[in-house]
Image (spheres, grey):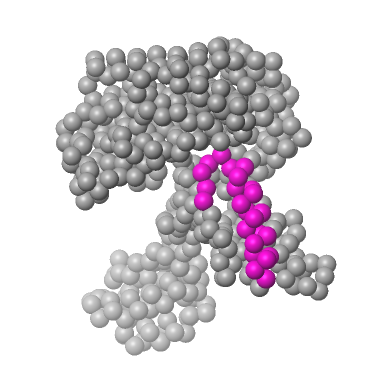
């Protein structure tokens, strides 16, 4: 089946889905009032320098100050060799190498100083944006790195002859002291198109520098294109046969952009005109709902359970109803784990889960079976555009892996902590609250001068006090020599209660 890009665009929101082989593999969303900032270039002002963290906080006109580590600020000429000779097609590019112990943040930057920085990672939760001074400006065919003298070629371009051709073109035409990463889509591209892309990016950088000399920090110098154009630029490659858009204005916008920067792709842009919502027609809405669920069923009858903590994400593999067609338990477990390995990677991409990830596969006794599952996991991870690193399966059936966190996960973007349980995922049971009330009555009753004590609580708690715990309440009332009156409060939290004297 063909690979397609499906775009649902409205005045308030843009959603882009990449469908590979008939399966939704990646999902991107952007809301007009909550537009992403990764790739934006700012003239920032240093607010604080923290030697203990080897970092600084920089005002870039966001709600929270950005975080700039010394490794993302100092231009390590001696460490340029640490950059991989093969450039990665991912963007933003990888870190610029390790920090020398001799260099500290205080040697590089001072409070009140103005610096040119770019957002490398979106603000997440209570954290501000991650900043870097190693500017990277992506084009259609190349990524321009004005602060690093380096040429990289996408690993996905396998022909050595083509790699040499592209390297020669870039080497002969790049400004001295600057660098480029040649993207996968550049394979077999005409030299004229490659040079035009390079020239546009160099001119853009020159305009940024000119503007920087005329303004005071904090100031936005360059803003990345919106999701619609970014997706067209980065995802609409020779591996994608069609780009389908459901909004006429968005279609015209993309058509104009494509005609200017990638005219050979113009014939493959389509306007969706059916009355059925485009994400319904392609089965995408169902997959989004599935990606927000804690539990994901497997075709075999097993399931995956996703849990998120502050430190990491955990995925638990369960056999569930799957018992296999043979009497060999190890074979049943192997089949479930192999299916789970593929589904886990699919869900990680769809949910955009990043950071440390622990996968708890079902225990396998045979080391060869553990190896099979790990190889399957590894093969699936190679399809992921985001950088990943996974360790071999341990004897306990655990896989420790990392996935680069470049933006909020799908759950973080679409959801918010439960206002009732405050994000804990649970509340105290009514019975637990009842026993808390008993203990509080024993403490407070002697301090109340009146003979009557009023207990106000949630209806579910009052119901338990009036039924299952009625006798213990009466005995407690006698022991403290007070008459206890119950009052049901409908619009309060289940854990809330109040004990007071006469009202």
Q: Residue at x 54, y 32 (%)?
A: 154
Between 412 and 109, the one nearer to me in the picture: 109
Q: Residue at x 73, y 37 (%)?
A: 22
Q: Position of residue 10 (x, y in %)?
A: 57, 25
Between 32 and 128, the one nearer to me in the picture: 128
- Magenta run includes residue 482: no
Can you say whether 417 is above or below 58 in the image? Answer: below
Q: Residue at x 25, y 29 (%)?
A: 115
Residues in magenta, as a range: 366-389
Image check: 84 left or right of 105? right
- Residue 7, by quadrant, is top right
- Magenta run includes residue 379: yes
Q: How many callouts does the rendering have?
A: 0
Can you say whether 496 is above or below 99 in the image? Answer: below
Q: Quadrant of the N terminus?
A: top right
Q: Position of residue 486 (x, y in %)?
A: 41, 71
Q: Position of residue 119 (x, y in %)?
A: 37, 33
**Visible in this render: residue 421?**
no
Image check: 211 left or right of 113? right
Q: Position of residue 117 (x, y in %)?
A: 31, 30
- Residue 60, by quadrant, is top left
**Visible in this render: residue 382?**
yes
Q: Quadrant of the C terminus?
A: bottom left
Q: Main secondary structure of the magenta part?
A: helix
Between 71 and 85, the one nearer to me in the picture: 85
Q: Residue at x 48, y 70 (%)?
A: 430
Can you say whether 187 is above or below 487 in the image? Answer: above
């Amino acid at each position: 089946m063909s690979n397609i890009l499906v775009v649902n665009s409205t005045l308030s929101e843009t959603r882009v889905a990449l469908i590979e082989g008939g399966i939704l593999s990646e999902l991107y969303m952007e809301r007009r009032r909550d537009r992403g900032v990764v790739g934006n270039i700012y003239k920032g002002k240093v607010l604080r320098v923290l030697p203990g963290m080897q970092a600084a906080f920089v005002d870039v006109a966001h709600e929270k100050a950005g975080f700039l580590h010394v490794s993302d600020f100092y231009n390590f000429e001696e460490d340029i060799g640490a950059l991989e000779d093969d450039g990665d097609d991912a963007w933003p590019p990888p870190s610029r190498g390790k920090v020398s112990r001799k260099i500290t943040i205080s040697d590089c930057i001072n409070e009140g100083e103005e610096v040119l920085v770019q957002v490398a990672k979106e603000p997440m939760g209570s954290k501000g944006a991650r900043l870097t001074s190693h500017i990277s400006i992506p084009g259609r065919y190349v990524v321009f790195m004005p602060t690093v003298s380096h040429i990289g070629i996408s690993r996905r371009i396998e022909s050595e002859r083509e790699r040499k051709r592209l390297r020669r073109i870039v080497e002969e035409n790049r400004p001295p002291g600057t660098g480029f990463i040649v993207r996968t889509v550049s394979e077999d591209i005409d030299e004229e198109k490659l040079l035009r892309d390079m020239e546009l990016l160099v001119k853009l950088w020159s305009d940024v520098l000119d503007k920087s000399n005329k303004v005071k920090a904090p100031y936005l110098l360059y803003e990345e294109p919106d999701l619609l154009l970014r997706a067209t630029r980065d995802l609409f490659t020779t591996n994608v046969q069609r780009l389908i858009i459901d909004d006429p204005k968005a279609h015209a916008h993309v058509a104009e952009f494509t005609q200017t920067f990638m005219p050979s792709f113009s014939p493959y842009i389509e306007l969706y005109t059916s009355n059925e919502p485009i994400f319904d027609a392609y089965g995408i809405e169902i997959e989004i709902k599935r990606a927000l669920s804690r539990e994901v069923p497997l075709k075999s009858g097993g399931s995956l359970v996703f849990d998120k903590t502050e430190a990491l994400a955990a995925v638990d593999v369960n056999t569930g109803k799957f018992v296999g067609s043979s009497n060999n338990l190890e074979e049943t477990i192997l089949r479930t784990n192999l299916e789970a390995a593929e589904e886990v990677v699919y869900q990680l991409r769809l949910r955009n889960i990043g950071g440390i990830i622990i996968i708890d596969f079902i225990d396998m006794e045979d080391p060869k079976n553990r190896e099979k599952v790990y190889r399957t996991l590894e093969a699936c991870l190679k399809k992921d555009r985001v950088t990943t690193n996974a360790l071999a399966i341990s004897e306990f059936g655990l896989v420790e892996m990392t996935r680069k966190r470049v933006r909020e996960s799908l759950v973080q973007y679409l959801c918010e902590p439960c206002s009732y349980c405050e994000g804990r995922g649970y509340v105290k049971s009514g019975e637990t609250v009842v026993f808390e009330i008993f203990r509080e009555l024993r403490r407070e009753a002697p301090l109340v001068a009146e003979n009557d004590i009023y207990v106000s609580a949630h209806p579910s708690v009052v119901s338990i006090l009036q039924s299952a715990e009625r006798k213990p309440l009466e005995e407690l009332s006698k022991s403290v020599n007070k008459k206890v009156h119950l009052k049901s409060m409908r619009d309060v939290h289940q854990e809330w209660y109040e004990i007071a004297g006469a009202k």
